[in-house]
Image (spheres, rainbow, N blue to C red):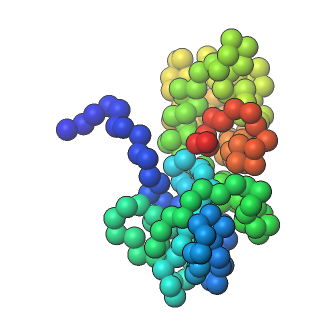
């Protein structure tokens, strides 16, 4: 049976590796040691600390399965992490990995742009995305009224808004690092 609104999933299914320490100590759960991975969840874009299966290998940027059933390389998701507590190498990998997520989940982000609403009478959600000022916003709203955007290329072509992936990623990084007051994409 198809339901229009599936209930929001509480758990992430996949995460992308930002950093790992083969002989690490958990910073979120006392006394847990082993392969400690810093990753970012694909769906909610939250930073996670993950315990890997002993002797398994990980690569930076790798997409790993962290869902409930059938994990192969992940023992447990230890908890959420704060950006400040992540390693400098995790922080330097973040922009690349986030751009990958925004690229790989194009339909989700394009749908967001198609549905974004005003947050207050004066501020529209779209304006909070870097590079979208009042002018682009107006054009975007007019264009999506006529016909929903189908892809980043479609958006770029019809609105002239260059490099949507880069700008959406920039916004996500601001939300992860705590630069922004309101979150559009990152689940708090």
Residue at (61, 70) in percent of width and height: 30
Q: Is residue 114 above or below residue 91?
A: above
| Quarter of the figure with the C terminus | top right
Question: Of 20 and 112, which appears nearest the observer?
Answer: 20
| Quarter of the figure with the N terminus | top left
The answer to whether residue 47 is seen in the rendering is yes
Count of numbered marks: 0
Residue at (58, 42) in percent of width and height: 187
Side of 79 where 167 appears, left or right: right
The answer to whether residue 138 is seen in the rendering is no
Q: Is residue 58 above or below residue 92?
A: below
Which residue, as the protein is rendered here, is positioned at the far left?
1
Residue at (59, 21) in percent of width and height: 117
Which residue, as the protein is rendered here, is positioned at the far front?
30
Side of 114 where 20 appears, left or right: right
Residue 139's image quarter? top right
Residue at (59, 79) in percent of width and height: 33
Percent x, y of residue 134: 77, 20
Question: Of 36 and 99, which appears nearest the observer?
Answer: 36
Percent x, y of residue 89: 76, 69
Percent x, y of residue 176: 70, 48
Q: Is residue 45 above or below residue 66?
A: above
Percent x, y of residue 24: 65, 79
Side of 53 where 26 appears, left or right: right
Residue 68's image quarter? bottom left
Which residue, as the protein is rendered here, is positioned at the far bottom?
55
Question: Of 115 and 19, which appears nearest the observer?
Answer: 19
């Amino acid at each position: 049976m198809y339901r229009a609104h599936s209930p929001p999933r509480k758990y992430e299914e996949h995460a992308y590796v930002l950093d790992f320490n083969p002989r690490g100590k958990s910073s979120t759960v006392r006394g847990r040691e082993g392969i400690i991975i810093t990753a970012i969840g694909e769906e909610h874009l939250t930073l996670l600390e993950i315990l890997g299966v002993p002797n398994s290998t990980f690569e930076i940027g790798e997409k790993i399965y962290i869902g409930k059933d059938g994990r192969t390389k992940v023992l447990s998701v230890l908890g959420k992490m704060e950006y400040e507590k992540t390693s400098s190498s995790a922080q330097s990998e973040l922009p690349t990995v986030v751009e990958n997520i925004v690229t790989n989940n194009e339909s989700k982000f394009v749908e967001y742009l198609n549905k974004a609403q005003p947050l207050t009478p004066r501020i529209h959600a779209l304006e909070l995305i870097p590079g979208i000022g009042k002018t682009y916003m107006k054009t975007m709203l007019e264009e999506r009224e006529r016909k929903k955007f189908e892809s980043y290329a479609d958006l770029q072509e019809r609105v002239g808004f260059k490099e949507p992936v880069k700008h959406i990623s920039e916004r996500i990084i601001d939300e992860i690092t705590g630069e922004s007051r309101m979150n559009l994409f990152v689940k708090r």
